[in-house]
Image (cartoon, helix red, strand yellow):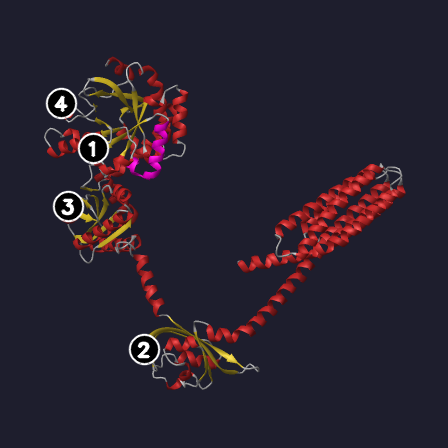
Amino acid sequence: MNEINEKHYQVKQELMKLAASNSVLSSLALFVNLLVITIAFWDITNKIFLITWMISIVILLTIRTLIAKYFLNNPLKIALEKVETYFKVLTLTGGVFLSIGLVIILPEELPFHQAFLSMIVAGVSAGSVMGLSYSRTLALNYLLILLLPFIYIIYIQGTQLHMLISILMFLFMLMLILFSRRYYRNLLDIILSKILINQAQRELKLSENNFTSIFKEVPIGIFTYDKDLIITEANQAFASLLKAPLELLINLDMKELPDRSIQSALTMTLKGEKGFYEGLYHTKISNKDIQISMRTVPMFDIDQTIKGGLGIVENITERIASEKKIRHQAFYDHLTGLANRLTLNKHLKQQLLRSKKDHRFAAILFIDIDHFKTINDSLGHDIGDTLLKIFAQRASRLVREEDTTARLGGDEFVILLSDLSEDELLAIKRANTVAEKLHELMKEPINLKSHSLHITLSIGITIIGSKQNNINDILKHADLAMYKAKQLGRNTTCFFEEEMSKNIKEQLILQNELRIAIEKEQFELYYQPIVHINSDKITSCEALIRWNHPTRGLIYPDSFIPHAEKNGLIIPLGKWVMQRACRDYQELKEYIVNIAINISSKQFNQQEFIKDILEITQKHNVNPNNIKLELTESVALDNQSETIDKMKILKSHGFIIAMDDFGTGYSSLSYLKNLPFDFIKIDRHFIKNILNNESDASLVKTIVAISKQFKFFVVAEGVETQEQAALLKSLECDYIQGYVISKPVPIDEFKKLF
């Protein structure tokens, strides 16, 4: 492709050189014609117009000539495309000026002057073909610009003679166009021939000058031999390949070599054919075994009689090793060394064939490491990669030799348990036993650097029988079961059931309905009060979305927010929540200080997020101080430096920022010192068992203490009893939120709480 582009460039350059060379002569000829026209029409045309017209064209011709001269003197310094563009623009502009002037000065009732001008136009047109045919389009456009208006003016004179002249001139124009195209083709042929001849001469000279040097210095072993298979010449690379002195190779009789594997390739050349050998070769001189690739070709004398052969030898020992490595990489995961998707699919296809033939059941375990993304993002990819390797090692120890453990990507692993049993129930039991062992295996903490990681797994299992025939469906079913395990709280195993596929279809329906719901605004905001624990006063509230579905009734966010997150609908939905909360605040501002609004990660990471939220608050005349933005740990810790910058900008405008669901992710409390939060919201999971679980109580106490140190206010979510509230008050928690005060209610009911 580069060679074609280079040749195309050379042709264009040669054509441009011809055009530039002809530019001076063609410009001079046109100037003479203009001068003759000016003299001939001096007394019958406006003199100022004639002079202005002539000077304008002369200026264009002069500029074009200067550019052409500069190009001829500096062909390598000036861009060809730019010169070509300038040349064409100036030529066509000059053509337009010339055409306009000819039309204007053509006298209506002076036949002699008309005939004279027609001759001038014909001559200029014919001359332009020679000068401009380096470009088919330029010559064509110039002829059309110059002749068509003039032909038209002659034609509308109305006499038979004028009409005949215009027809003749039109035919003349067509003839010039055809001639221009032929001339262009001839130019191309000449230039291409010249380029090919020059190229051939250069290549021949280069070949002659460099053959000896190449023969000696090329890093591939080369040798020549005569009809008796005696080496006549050899290069240093050949000697190095065989680990032998070069002088010992010259005049070596290859018929006497003990390794006969290359003899066939050598003798093929003596029959006028090419020879080839690839494989192991034992060198006599250095007593080494190496992998070689040898090609041999006949060598001829001046009479085309075979005089021997030329051998090209390459040491492919490293290549063979690399190919073996590449084959391994093609079928195995580079990080863990486990089988990859390609190998898994191959083994799964083989299992399907065996299941149909032997009626034995197998199983697929689809495994996902819980909270892996949080670990990877917060502790670093090196920790994440090491964790994947450790899991792969542990999982591999559990399975049989005939089973397949594969990594599909990220933290997703699949185990194919082959030929478990002819009894489906027994196959299910054995698959579940492997899953239980995996869970048990991961109970042992993984210590990486200064971190002790307690890892859990979500496992989905599908059983493979003789009726299954689609590997994609099998993997999809196992994947669905794994996601069901995640929904059940992670750290568990779930078997695939047909109901799961039905649920997926229902989710697709829900997604479509969700799009319609956003368009028709079928949503409503409920508000749950937040109470200051010391004063027992409602100071704030959290806006929580509800979907008033036309047929299903009230739908809670857990049922539709995940779908909105997956398909990008969370962005318009989040804007709607912000708009409605700001609007509702105008009704609630006499009761509360601020409204808390949940912000999704996709919302927050949008480039226009800050701009959008400022526009919404300005539109509804709400001070940012009255809006509390609740971000989850994962949002806060994802791209931490960018997140901190964005949080600081929001705080500079007055927004209050809270970390929501604190403790559910994998964040370390030490990160808090870097994150500019105002509030920390302790997740309801820890509040639920705070009275009867010392660990949860201790964790809440620690969170409150550290938050006080960092000057964060603390809100406890999910407070359901007075006893929980009392304990939180004793721990110096600042605010509480939960059913002990009120469940989330519509705005009108919320007002009644006061």
Mark 1 or 4: in front is 1
Identify the residue at horizontal 23%, vertical 18% (top origin): 538
Question: Counting residues from the N terminus, which is met first, the one under dot 1 or under dot 4?
Answer: 1
Mark 3 or 4: in front is 4
Say which residue label 2 marks: 288
Say which residue label 3 marks: 443
Q: Secondary structure at mark 1?
A: helix
The kind of residue tagged 3 is Lys
Viewed as shown, does residue 532 lie left or right of 639?
left
Mark 3 and mark 4: Cα distance apart in space: 36 Å
Say which residue label 4 marks: 726
Task: Specify the quadrant that holds the C terminus.
Answer: top left
Q: Is residue 163 above or below residue 469?
A: above
Q: State yes or no: discs 3 and 4 in contact (Cβ < 8 Å).
A: no
Mark 1 or 3: in front is 1
Point out the stretch of residues depicted in magenta: 634-652
Q: Is residue 286 magenta?
A: no
Magenta span: predominant SS is: helix
Question: Counting residues from the N terminus, which is met first, the one under dot 4 or under dot 2?
Answer: 2
Identify the residue at horizontal 16%, vertical 29% (top origin): 687
Q: State yes or no: discs 4 and 2 in contact (Cβ < 8 Å).
A: no
In front of the other: 210 or 73: 73
Say which residue label 1 marks: 706
Residue 594: image x %, image y %?
30, 21
Identify the residue at horizontal 77%, vertical 49% (top origin): 125
